[in-house]
Image (cartoon, rainbow, N blue to C red):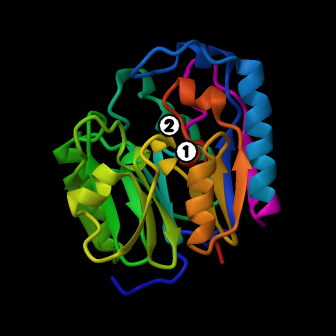
Amino acid sequence: MPHREGLSWRFTHAITRVPADSVADGLRAVDTGNPSGEAFRAEHAAYVNALKAAGLTVDVLPQLEGFPDSCFVEDPAFCLPEGAILLRPGTASREGEAAEIRAALEARFDTVVEIPGDGHVDGGDVLTLDDEILIGLSARTDRRGADAFAALLAEWGYNARVAETPEGVLHFKTACSTLGEGVILATNVMIDSGFFGDRKTVQVPEDEEYAANVIRVNDVVLVPEGYPKTRDVVEAAGFKTVVLPTHEARKVDGGLSCLSLRFSLD
């Protein structure tokens, strides 16, 4: 796969979904209280506005009460300039989310395909770089799914590498993000894993690990509110930041990247 400058951060469009009131029943590793649908929708509106301010056209899909975690649209699908791939999230309560988002993808892409086989892949385990796509094995992404996904990506001309997500990390991207231009923001455990080789890394301060999940969107990096040391290290690395609240999303193991599918149609 040739280096494609901006593949991981230069976008024209995004797809999001309004959080449902049923998000209070959403998945979580640790119970820190139920998110409020109303408060979550307010945070989501700020998130959509930030994407628009960064230059994206944003499709906002309606809430789905039957799927508590459906606002985390990154997990059931994956988008590239060539088309969209429907994934298969590794939790029973999320079965059916891919089917629900298909029409929105077909409205934007000529090519929409399903991941082959019966394995599972959550989009939160897929880190796109400008020259490689990393797929992390986790409680939500298994080897069969990762290998099938990697093979499909290879057919599309992309290099994909399957990696073991460190123990205790829910999703691969829970603990790392691309800042673009060859720089990766990551927790200490991810940096020590050796996944990133000789790539330049910026370490998340050890008491702010949640803030490893940021998103570079064109000229800005969206950073979760309440993590000033992470914001400072991102800015010290030469990137402009925009701070957004994610207090409700965090209660159900969500972060900034989970809330949108970002892609370029140029």
- Marks 1/2: CA–CA distance: 5 Å
Determine the image quadrant of residue 249.
top right
Instruction: Give the residue drawn at x 66%, y 78%.
Output: 266
Relative to residue 182, is residue 40 drawn left or right? right
Which residue matches tag 1? 102
In this view, the residue in front, 137 or 91, is 137
Nearer-the-camera pick, 51 or 229: 229
Secondary structure type for disc 2: helix
Residue 227 at what x, y percent from top left? 60, 44
Q: Nearer the viewer, residue 122 or 237?
A: 237
Q: Is residue 63 visible?
A: yes
Disc assigned to residue 99: 2
Identify the residue shown where x is 37% and y is 87%. 2
Look at the picture and state if 200 lies above or below 18. below
Tell me if 130 is positioned left or right of 219 in this view: left
Measured from the top left, where is residue 162 in percent x and y? 22, 58
Magenta span covers which residues? 53-72
Image position, residue 212 (x, y; %) = 48, 50
90 displayed left or right of 182: left
Tag shown at residue 250:
none
Q: Amino acid at mark 2?
A: Ala
Secondary structure predominantly adopted by residues drawn in magenta: loop
Mark 1 in CB contact with mark 2 (< 8 angstroms): yes
Who is closer to the viewer here, 5 or 75? 5
Disc 1 marks a residue whose amino acid type is Arg
Mark 1: give few (<14), some (14-19) or many (20+) Cα within 10 Å.
Answer: some
> Is 71 inside the magenta-drawn segment?
yes
From this view, report whether residue 86 is shown above or below residue 97.
below
